[in-house]
Image: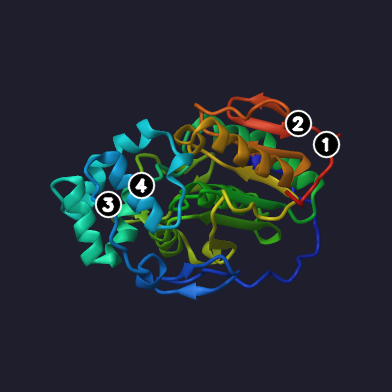
Amino acid sequence: MLQSLYVTSRSMDTPAPITGYGPHVYFSGAAGARKTRTALLSGGCKLSQPAENTAGLMAFLFAEAGLDVSRYRAAALERRHAACLRALGASHPEHAQKILQNKPERLAAAIDSVLLGVTDFFRDRDVFEGLGNSVLPQILATTARPRIWSAACSSGQELYSVALMLEHAGALEVCELLGTDLRPEALRLAVRARFPAPSGDGLNGCRLHRRGNHVEIPEHTRRRIRWARRDLFRSAEQGPWDLILWRNMAIYLTPDAAQEVWQRLATELKPGGFLISGKAERPPRGLGLERIAPSIYRKHRSEGTNHAL
């Protein structure tokens, strides 16, 4: 159980600057750069062919946001069509395009409605039991300063869950935790660290701090996590990482696009390190990853690291 996590006594390095701590902070590709909410995705929607159908609207949205729509499964985008129209208050695709052309600051909300990330505290309890009973104890017993990255972290509840587990074990202060996502709104919610209360109170002694109908992450926990706006299709965060969480994004990508991201993540994973996927996802073969439990993979120790991908 989580209480069995073993932590050796070790000196604590001076923590890195907390990029992204505090309300209403957004991120660009440059490390630590801050931008306002309006400035991020409001470069000005240019006139183009009318978006007469879902595909046309999605192509317009993704192009304006600087994203490649061809990397995403068409069926997955189709399912988000109605949500996008609701987010903009539009009645049909061409109406939505006109709204964005007149009010480009609405682009961030439209993209967020399409690339909506579903997450929660201790999501998939069996997976987090495995983290607490096996993965984290092994990492803490062999690594002086564990590095943990939540890629496409959405609003951050899963990374906060890991942080609470480490805190319960007395190990949070010696760990480096990073959450990255492409969507500014998701990162804003992660930085704010106040969420609707889930049905459960926690996991194996990790108590969520409730205040009314919400959960608030204590400041001392928040300060141990950095948040950054990143595009996984452009680059991965430089490893080696002891633990990477990439959950429930690959199922929305085309096979080639998913393969590209899996490769990047596996390259930056430390030999012997762990990768956590979504329940319906499985890394492709040939990456040196061995499935040791549902949704939990370990990189072969014989695999070398190559951070030049």
Q: Report which residue position mark 2 lands on.
A: 288
Identify the residue at horizontal 30%, vertical 57% (top origin): 109
Locate residue 129 relative to residue 292 in the image: left or right. left
Give how far across and how far down residue 306 sits, in percent.
80, 47
**How many other residues sit within 10 Å of disc 4, few (<14), some (14-19) or many (≥20)?**
some
**Amino acid type for the residue under numbered disc 4:** Ala
Report crowding for label 1: few under 14, some 14 to 19, many 20 or more residues within 10 A (C-alpha). some
Between disc 3 and disc 2, the foreground one is: 3
First-in-chain label (1 vs 2):
2
In whole angstroms, how far apart are the C-alphas of marks 3 and 1? 49 Å
Q: Is residue 81 left or right of residue 265?
A: left
Q: How is the image coloured?
A: rainbow
Query: Mark 2: which amino acid?
Result: Gly
Q: Foreground: 13 or 281?
A: 281
Q: Measure how far apart labels 1 and 4 are at the Cα level.
A: 39 Å
Q: Earlier in the sequence, mark 3 or mark 2?
A: 3
Label 2 residue SS: loop
State the residue position of label 1: 303
Q: Are marks 1 and 4 in contact (CB under 8 Å)?
A: no
Which mark is drawn over residue 59?
4
Residue sitting farthest toward the left: 91
The Cα atoms of the two marked residues, 3 and 2, are separated by 45 Å
50, 298: nearer the viewer: 50
Residue 49 is labelled as 3
Q: Closer to the camera, 117 or 232?
A: 232
Residue 227, above or below 290 = below
